[in-house]
Amino acid sequence: MINESRESIVQSTTMGSLRRGLLASLALLFVNLLPMALLLPGAHGAPAAGTGKSKISAVFVFGDSIVDPGNNNNRLTEARADFPPYGEDFPGGVATGRFSNGKVPGDMLASRLGIKELLPPYIGSDLQLSDLLTGVVFASGGSGYDPLTSIPATAISSTGQLELFLDYKEKLKALVGEEEMARVISEGIYFTVMGANDLANNYFTIPLRRHQYDLPSYVEFLVSSAVNFTMKLNEMGATRIGFIGIPPIGCCPSQRELGSRECEPMRNQAAQLFNSEITKEINRLNAEQSVPGSKFAYIDIYYNLLDLIQQPGLYGFKEVTEGCCGSTVLNAAIFIKNHPACPNVYDYIFWDSFHPTEKAYSIVVDKLIQQNMQYLM
């Protein structure tokens, strides 16, 4: 009996050791796999594209030159970027019409959400069916929520971009049928990025609106126009809309104060006022639910970009006030066609006098996704 008890104790001890060893191995495996898991779509509170209720079929973007990937290429406009030095760090070194040295936020949003690496323009590109099924960009450099803003730039107005979206829906319906078209539209995620031109290139540059409105009244007009745009997009089938606010435009190289090179305060205050008021409207749209099941999210680009500007060293930047291609109003778009860029672009937050570099955009987009995507899922 004593021997049997000893054998039982030995067996129990051996099994315990095996269990502890197995648990230790599993724990080690978990520790090793955790960092990998955090890099997968769905980490940081953002559910993975294509899973369950949060499935994303496509990404659609409306806006201005921050997200225009080439819709202006064949337009008679100053707001073009389909020539060097634009695109020098884009795959293949091609100037596609994107207003940066490489990819722009639309590409990055589509990539981070697991849809595709590049989000193409709707106009002038040889789109395949797979492109149409997974999303396109309707944005146009020089556009804004104010219908007057797009006229001097001969850009596609915000209303014109909605018309392009309607054309897209008809084209997709003809290719895949109404049911599949409806699925793509309903499962898509939508982003709108406008307002910077309304302030920088319209209100503070062209006298007409300043004669009609003081600054708070103009911002109120802009907010109303932006809400109308968002509601129309919602009525056309977009049920998940990310509304990206106005960046700190007073800190763009071309907008900074002469001499001191400090950020121009009035432009930044106008952007902040717009962002504050549109946030209230986005909350109202979520509460009213004119189209049942809709989700709207205000996405803050202002403070995320300002953080880079105020703490450049933290993000690996050295130059804050100047653009890699120059810093005046004539150091952007067609005015720098075939001009040389700086040799050390990775030190710069701004590529030209108005648009950030690919590196800066990438950091900001990562922040936007981590902070906001759970509200659109």
Image (spheres, rainbow, N blue to C red):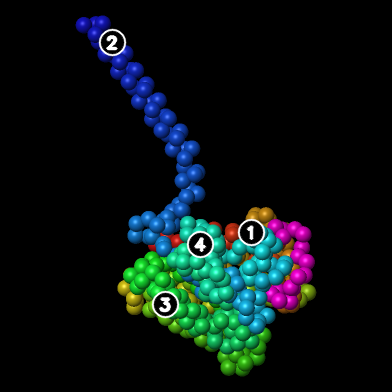
Q: Which residue is mark 2?
A: 7
| Amino acid on which disc 2 is placed | Glu
Q: Position of residue 8 (x, y in %)?
A: 26, 13
- Mark 4, other Cα within 10 Å: few <14 / some 14–19 / many ≥20: many
Residue placed at 46% from the left, 46% from the top? 37
Q: Nearer the viewer, residue 210 or 291?
A: 291
Residue placed at 74% from the left, 73% from the top? 336
Residue placed at 34% from the left, 17% from the top? 14
Q: Which residue is mark 4?
A: 110
Classify mark 2: helix, strand or loop. helix
| Amino acid on which disc 3 is placed | Glu
Q: CB atoms at circles 1 and 4 under 8 Å apart? A: no
Image quarter (top left, top right, bottom left or bottom right) of the C terminus: bottom left
- Mark 1, other Cα within 10 Å: few <14 / some 14–19 / many ≥20: few
- Examine the rendering and report whether any part of residue 269 can be seen: no
| Amino acid on which disc 1 is placed | Pro
Q: Nearer the viewer, mark 2 or mark 4?
A: 4
Q: Which residues are magenta?
A: 331-347
Q: Position of residue 328 (x, y in %)?
A: 74, 75
- The alpha-carbon separation of the residues under discs 2 and 1 comes to 68 Å
Left or right relative to 351: residue 294: left
Classify mark 1: helix, strand or loop. helix
- The alpha-carbon separation of the residues under discs 1 and 3 comes to 32 Å
Q: Which label sits on residue 91?
A: 1
* Position of 150 relative to 299 (above/below): below
Q: Which label sits on residue 170?
A: 3
Q: Nearer the viewer, mark 2 or mark 1?
A: 1
